[in-house]
Amino acid sequence: METGKMDRAGHAALSALGAFLLSPPEDTPPEVLEAFSLFAGPNSEPLPPRLFFEAVEQGPVAISITDASARILYVNHAFERLTGYPRDVVLGKNQSILSNNATPDSVYQGLWRTIQDKRPWTGTLVNRTRDGGDYLAELTVSPMLDRDGRIDYFLGMHRDITKVHALETSLRQQKSLIETIIDAAPVLVALLDERGKVLVDNQEYKKLLGDLRGREPAELLRAAIREQAGFDPIATVLGGQAFKDLEVFVALANNRPPRWFACSGERVTELDEGVRGYFGNDVGGMPRVLLLANDITRRRREAERAQMENLRARLAEQQFVQGMREALTAAIYQIQVPLNVIQAASGMLRDGGCHPDSLAGMIEQIRATGERALQTLRAALPEESRELGAVVNVNDMLRQVLELSTDTLLAAGIVVDWRPANVLPELNVHKTQLRSVFKLLLDNAVQALNESNGVHRELRIATRRVGDGVEVEIEDNGVGLAAEDRLRVFEPFYVGWRNRRGRAGMGLALAQEVVNQHGGYIQLDSAGGFGKVAGDDIEPSGSSRGCLVRLTLSNLTGEPGRALSVDGEP
Ligand code: FAD
């Protein structure tokens, strides 16, 4: 009821004010008219004068009004809430009551210079609340002038920007962290716009720019991808198709070898910093291309060199095999002649019609052609290569040989049980010769398994430390070996295989020589229990199933080696 009365009274007063302003008395001073018209609303509908006070009083920004020397005359509720000071405590005090002494004096000097120059000042101060809490205040001080242009009052408005500042600081820190990481990345990074212009790059990019003597790496890579992969990386990525680890080369000037790069491209959208992007809609978001390029020149060159070496080795091997074939074919042909003569001589002797002179002539012919065949074979004998000792881990050598034979083992359906010792002494050995011995023993095991026709084909390879040396066991469940053959297999030219093709019977004889050079021994035995596998169809007669090859090795020099783990680590 009371409020209704007040409203009606206020409304009546405002109507009267409106009427007054529409036709004011002639002698009304202009200041009065100006002051009254300030309360007038649209169409000269006056607003209640209290509204202006309430707007300040209830406004969400901390507001203070001071005299010309910053003595507080008025503060609103938001000021009380933000600073913790009740109105009656701060009235009459200087605004410096809020200072926490962390704001540099130069800032205050700037503030005062500006406001005394009758201009508004906006800046940031470090303030302290009544209970001692620090906060960052974004303050605007506006001078309020009297009719003669003198400073009457100052209007201060401030808000707490502590959280905004913390956010900005953490953003700045994150930005600088990301920039450091991108700069330190061993990969070339470039952010490109739709025309291929570089917007952001990193140290690796700049390094390449220097190497290319100012030619833009992004342009060269773009051209290389276009030429070598047949698509434009920027159009493709912006069209929504990323690419990864595409290997291209960039030709360099002055006949320098080309540089190889593994390139990846991905589309990223740069958010619009403008006001239109404020609500997070995609309006104005700029599509960009993130180009990453990893310099793989060294890897490519190493791969090419390895390929060349491999090719060279294969060519040399082919040449060697071809030479041996030719020499053996010639020797076979030459040996055929004395054999024919011997056959003729024995026929003549049998018939009793052989004259001693003609027999002597025939024997001479046999000698001469036999000698020629021998010469052919001697000439074909390759020179013995002198190998220097090298320090190796036998586990590594066996693993390499196994890897080399993977295809053969898979094709023959052989299950390999590889049991390397955890720690082996490092040995000084003739590396190539020893590797050939392991390869021969593995090939023998494969042949034994192939000749057995067994269903379950197994191969067990184990190493163990024996004093300062190493013992290697290669065991198969193949055809096995008769007891009486266990020594004969080391005789030169002994071949016990059913399939003799490509076998000269020298493998184990030479292997024994190599193992002896390494202060060890090699022996073949029947496989203890390992050979007895259920489901095998053939049980060879006269020999137990399977074969166990055991060999020991020590240093060429006889010196003890350093202990190495399975992985070759000390
Ligand atoms: P002071 O000696 O008071 O001032 C430091 C320097 O400011 C002086 O060396 C001098 O160069 C200059 N200065 C101070 N007073 C005057 C003057 N009357 N005329 C000319 N130069 C002068 N300060 C805050 O720390 N936090 C606030 O929130 C804040 N709000 C303000 C709001 C308004 C409306 C105004 C007018 C001032 C405000 N100030 C505020 C400034 C405050 O009045 C002090 O100047 C400031 O706090 C520094 O106080 P002080 O005692 O450390 O040093």
Image (tube, helix red, strand yellow):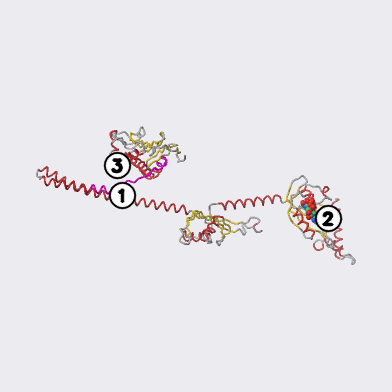
* Front-most of residues 428 and 465: 428
Q: What span is colored magenta in the figure?
A: 373-399
Q: Is residue 282 left or right of residue 361?
A: right
* Front-most of residues 259 and 268: 259
- Say whether disc 2 or disc 3 marks the residue closer to the N-terminus: 2
From what the image shows, is residue 3 above or below residue 417?
below
- Say whether disc 1 or disc 2 marks the residue closer to the N-terminus: 2
From what the image shows, is residue 353 above or below residue 157?
above
Q: CA distance from mark 1 to mark 3?
A: 16 Å
- Say whether disc 1 or disc 3 marks the residue closer to the N-terminus: 1
Residue wearing tag 2? 67
Q: Within the magenta stretch, is there residue 388?
A: yes
* Whole-percent x, y for residue 101 in the image: 76, 49
Contact check, label 2 and label 3, Cβ < 8 Å: no
Tell me: is circle 2 under 8 Å from ligand 1. Answer: no
Q: Is residue 318 left or right of residue 61?
A: left
Residue furthest to the left in view is 353
Residue wearing tag 1? 321
Residue furthest to the right in view is 27
Residue wearing tag 3? 506
* Whole-percent x, y for residue 34 in the image: 84, 63
From what the image shows, is residue 87 above or below residue 489?
below
Amino acid under disc 1: Val
Q: CA distance from mark 2 to mark 3?
A: 115 Å
Q: CA distance from mark 1 to mark 2?
A: 109 Å
Q: Within the magenta stretch, is there residue 386?
A: yes
Contact check, label 1 and label 2, Cβ < 8 Å: no
Q: Secondary structure at mark 2?
A: strand
Amino acid under disc 2: Asp
